[in-house]
Amino acid sequence: MSSAVRGRKTARSRKEGEKANLDKNGIADGTGDATVTSTTNEETEITTSQQSPNKSSKKKSKSDSETKDDSSVGHSWLGSCCHKVKYLFLVLFIPPFLNYASLQREVVELKPQGELYDVGWGRKMFLSCHGKGTPTVVLDAPTGLNSDVWTLVVKKLQEHTNVCVYDRAGLGFSDRPLNQSASAKQSDSQLNVNSAHQGTLFTVESMAEDLHTLISSSSEQPRPLILVGAELGSLVAQFYTHLYDTDVLGLVLVNPLPEDLFTEANGAWVQHWFGALGPTYQSLQLGAALGITRLGLLVGALQQPIMGEEIPEEVVLRQKYLLCHPRHLSSVVDEHYFINETFSQMRTLRKLRLLPSNVSISVLSGNYYDEQMPSHLNK
């Protein structure tokens, strides 16, 4: 029994010794660790190969995201520009177009009672006469205003005699004076005659000639005449009387403009006329061309120049129409711009010819306060 036990122990010891030798040999050869290391490297490579697509996928996703961001920024900028162009189109084109369309309709609806007479070269001027009898009273409006300013006066005077109102060249419903381009197709002799008057457009000389043609050759109003003029209209009446004294029975000058106006008040009138009135009317002309003036009238930011409780609604609407008309406002600007030449023509004519003694002259001057003028000029 003991020998059998001993034999088993010896066999177990021998097996453990062989196993120990195998372990030593494996360590010495490095095959054991190599196997483990190889296995570990393979697992690492597998893990790396599995992670690599994920990283590239993330990079690609990031790149796509950046591209989308750049694209969205570009689309946003383009969209903003498109909106600005739309707004610019609305501001620059829609109001002028609507204003032009309205003017074409209103020129027919708001035309006052009267006639358009040809005063030469196909140019027409507006004249309206009311009542019967003699003398014929001709009313000439202040600077830059049309015949509507005399509405209430005509209503009273027509009960007693023949009274006429007209629009100076370019104002109201009268055509502007001819320019070089309009006369380009005329004959040489006609062109020379017309060119001789190019320097006097919108001055008292051309205005007086227009008035004489209008009431003598075109409409043949009965004589004698009583000429009533306000401001610039008073200068036209005086100039007309100097040239055609046999036609005129009397002059009524309402707030007449003196020829030495710009030498008074230390140049204050020059500053007011050319520094305030001129730019104001130029701004109105630009606003009318852009259609802004009509919008200003609609919202109450602007008012027509002729107002009053007794002014007929038709006159109010017509004044708004003219305030939106670039052609009318262009003539208003020109009448103010050439006032110095008008004064010069008046001074020259007075030296050459005196007013006839048989013509009665009345001067009317008001003492009302003009809100558009500086306080030191309201005297």
Image (cartoon, rainbow, N blue to C red):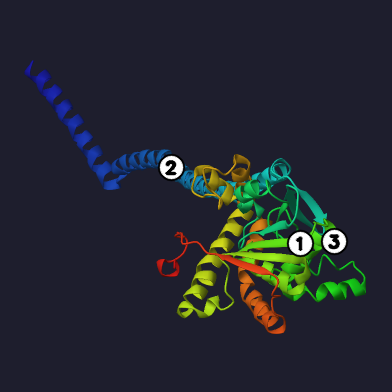
Q: Pinpoint residue 365: horizontal percent, then vertical percent.
A: 52, 64
Q: What element carries label 2?
A: helix
Q: In this view, does 7 lie to the left or right of 96?
A: left
Q: Where is residue 285 in the image (x, y as percent from the top left)?
A: 61, 58
Residue named by callout 3? 217
Q: What's the residue type where badge 1 is placed?
A: Pro
Residue 33 higher or lower than 331, as above or below: above
Labels 2 and 1: the sequence-earlier one = 2
Q: Earlier in the sequence, mark 3 or mark 1?
A: 3
- In this rendered view, identify the residue nearer to me: 71 or 129: 129
Pair 2/1: label in front: 1
Decide if residue 83 is in sight here: no
Residue sitting at the far bottom: 351
Residue that mark 2 sits on: 58
Residue occupying the far left of the picture: 2
Label 1: few (<14), some or many (≥20) within 10 Å? Answer: some
Say what secondary structure mark 1 lies in: loop
The amino acid on which the numbered mark 2 sits, given as a three-letter code, is: Lys
From the top left corner, tell me how far across and down residue 335 is, in percent.
64, 67
Q: Name the residue under label 1.
A: 224
